[in-house]
Amino acid sequence: MKKETALNILTFLPLISEVISMFFLPMAIPVHYNADLHVIKYGVKYMLLLIGVLVVAFGLFMKMIYKSSVNTNRETIVYRLSVIALLIFNGINIFALVNAFLKV
């Protein structure tokens, strides 16, 4: 049960952080950068919610795969890969949120 709780936290954390940050973000945020990391395109702040929705969909998919692998010899591998993938997506979310606050 502990493993499912960790997957749930990693799944829903980006969406929760994005919904909370919507109250503090300006209406226009950077959405596209060039090779020198200069902002070349701005978009509305609600575009950030797309990342959270995609992470939730991916997290629920990975949780479904994990539940199907419980009590098999693949359980640990599936769990570790799920956590690593969700941590990467959480990092992308943190990068997007920090840049939305700092680059405007």
Image (cartoon, rainbow, N blue to C red):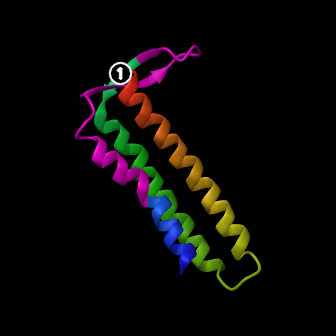
Task: Read off the magenta span.
Answer: 12-40
Q: Residue at x 50, y 59 (%)?
A: 10
Q: Position of residue 64 (x, y in %)?
A: 54, 72
Count every numbered label the image shows and give the total. Answer: 1
Q: Residue at x 37, y 39 (%)?
A: 48
The one nearer the camera, 50 or 81, is 81
Q: Amino acid at mark 1?
A: Tyr
**Left or right of 71 in this view: 28:** left
Would you place residue 104 above or below residue 97 in this image?
Answer: above
Q: Position of residue 45 (x, y in %)?
A: 30, 33
Pointer 1: what residue?
Answer: 42
Badge 1 density bin: few <14, some 14–19, many ≥20, Cα 10 Å:
some
Q: Residue furthest right?
A: 73
**Left or right of 20 in this view: 37:** right
Is 93 magenta? The answer is no
Would you place residue 86 above or below residue 44 in this image?
Answer: below
**Left or right of 70 in this view: 53:** left
